[in-house]
Amino acid sequence: MTAVYSVAVIMLMVLTFLCLTRAALGPTAADRVVAINVIGTKTMVIIALVSFLSGQQFFLDVALVYALIAFVMTIGVAKYMEKGALD
Amino acid sequence: MLLNIISSVLIFFGVFFFAVGVIGLLRLPDVYTRLHATTKCDTLGAGLILLGLFLQGNIFIAIKLLLIIILLWIANPTAAHVIAKASYYSGIPMTENSFDLNVSSRKGGA
């Protein structure tokens, strides 16, 4: 199974860099937020796969916390875009 | 053995759906269509990969992965909805030939 995990991690890293081009080019701020949201999901999955590759169980907790932080970040940036303030 | 094959197939399809989402993110014309492509593909792809890992570990790992899947399936659509609402009301234009209701409280709307 190690080969399958490794190939999946490498493919996901390539896809993450492709998303990064959209985050760099994106004409509006919303495009960048969408790209960063996608990168957050991919990073969470990569952390879960690396947890199985290295045999460290606690990486799954890291993945859980990373997903939570990415969600809060997206909500915060979207609210700032809509209202122009975070109060 | 059978479990390994099922896991490999699930992980393969997860990566495939991620790739489809990234193609949509790069190729589609405006932010709403990009959201449409990425959100569904990402939620499904991450769910499939984590389901593939779910079959491999012991009971504690399985419970943690289930927690992550449930959180993801609640958080990802919510985030997409909030981004779409924020970009619509802050007046980001749609692509040509799209049907726009032109809600009056929208910035730059009718």
Image (spheres, helix red, strand yellow):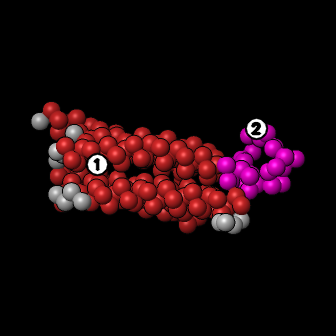
Q: Give the residue number, with chain letter if any, for mark 2.
A: B99
Magenta span: predominant SS is: loop
Q: Residue A83: percent from the left, percent from the top? A: 71, 61
The residue carrying pointer 1 sits among few (fewer than 14), some (14 to 19) or many (20 or more) residues within 10 Å by Cα, namely some
- Nearer to us in this view, B102 or B67: B67
Label whose residue precedes the other's in the sequence (2 or 1)? 1
The answer to whether residue B49 of the structure is visible from this angle is no
- Nearer to us in this view, B68 or A20: B68
User: What's the chain of the residue with tag 2?
Assistant: B
Q: Give the residue number, with chain letter if any, for mark 1.
A: B64
Quarter occupied by residue A64: bottom left
Image quarter in which the N terminus of chain B is found: top left
The answer to whether residue B25 of the structure is visible from this angle is yes
Left or right of B81 in this view: A65 = left
- Nearer to us in this view, B7 or A14: B7
Query: Magenta stretch: residue B103 in it?
Result: yes
* Residue at 19% in and 43% down: B59
The residue carrying pointer 2 sits among few (fewer than 14), some (14 to 19) or many (20 or more) residues within 10 Å by Cα, namely few
User: What's the chain of the residue with tag 1?
Assistant: B
The kind of residue on which mark 1 rests is: Lys
Quarter occupied by residue A50: bottom left
Question: Magenta stretch?
Answer: B85-110
Closer to viewer: mark 2 or mark 1: 1
**SS class of the residue under badge 1?**
helix
The kind of residue on which mark 2 rests is: Phe
Vertical order, B19 against A17 (above or below): above
Q: Residue A59: percent from the left, percent from the top? A: 26, 60
Query: Magenta stretch: residue A51 in it?
Result: no
